[in-house]
Amino acid sequence: MKNRLEELRKERNIRQEELAAALKVSRQTIGSLENGRYNPSIILAFKIAGYFGMSIEEIFIYEEDGEGQERTEK
């Protein structure tokens, strides 16, 4: 799953540490989300969407391959 988290955070001049504190997660969690190494829980996805005043779908992009299977990134 891809996301626009880093783009949105930088547009608003928010540091990873600030976002992490607002969401009650570690800065490492924010970094891992931005780098695509971690997919958030549904609760965290809702918190992130609420923080930015957006829908989950506007931030997180789910992709499927041609056969309806989830794509895995390498």
Image (cartoon, rainbow, N blue to C red):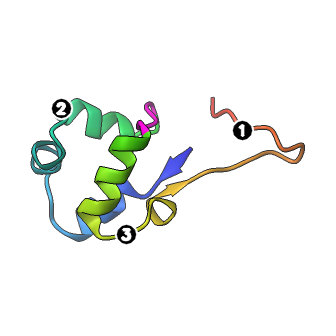
The amino acid type found where label 2 is placed reads Ser
Position of residue 2 measured from the top left corner of the image (x, y, whole percent): 53, 49
User: What is the CA distance from the residue labelled 2 to the residue labelled 3?
Assistant: 22 Å
Mark 3 → mark 1, Cα distance in angstroms: 24 Å
Dot 2: few (<14), some (14–19), or many (≥20) neighbours within 10 Å? Answer: some
SS for tag 1? loop
Identity of the residue drawn at 26% across and 70% down: 11
Q: Which mark is residue 71?
A: 1
Residue interval drawn in magenta: 37-41
Residue drawn 10% across the image and 50% down it: 18
Which corner quadrant of the image does residue 33 belong to?
top left
In this rendering, would 56 be left or right of 6? right
Quarter of the rendering containing residue 54: bottom left
Closer to the camera in the image, 58 or 4:
58
* SS under mark 2: loop
Give the residue drawn at x 18%, y 45%. Answer: 23
- Lower position in the chain sequence, tag 1 or tag 2: 2
- 74 left or right of 2 in image: right
Closer to the camera: disc 2 or disc 3?
3
Q: Three-letter amino acid code at disc 3?
A: Met
Q: Tell me the distance, in whole angstroms, between the alpha carbons under discs 1 and 2.
A: 27 Å
Q: Which residue does the numbered mark 2 point to in the structure image?
A: 26
What kind of element bears circle 3?
A: loop
Magenta highlight on residue 15 = no
**Pointers 3 and 1 in contact (C-beta within 8 Å):** no
Q: Which mark is residue 54?
A: 3
Query: Quadrant of the rendered structure where residue 25 is?
Result: top left
Identify the residue at the far right of this view: 67
Nearer the observer: mark 3 or 1; the answer is 3
Q: Residues within 10 Å of mark 1 (few under 14, many from 20)?
A: few
Q: Earlier in the sequence, mark 2 or mark 3?
A: 2
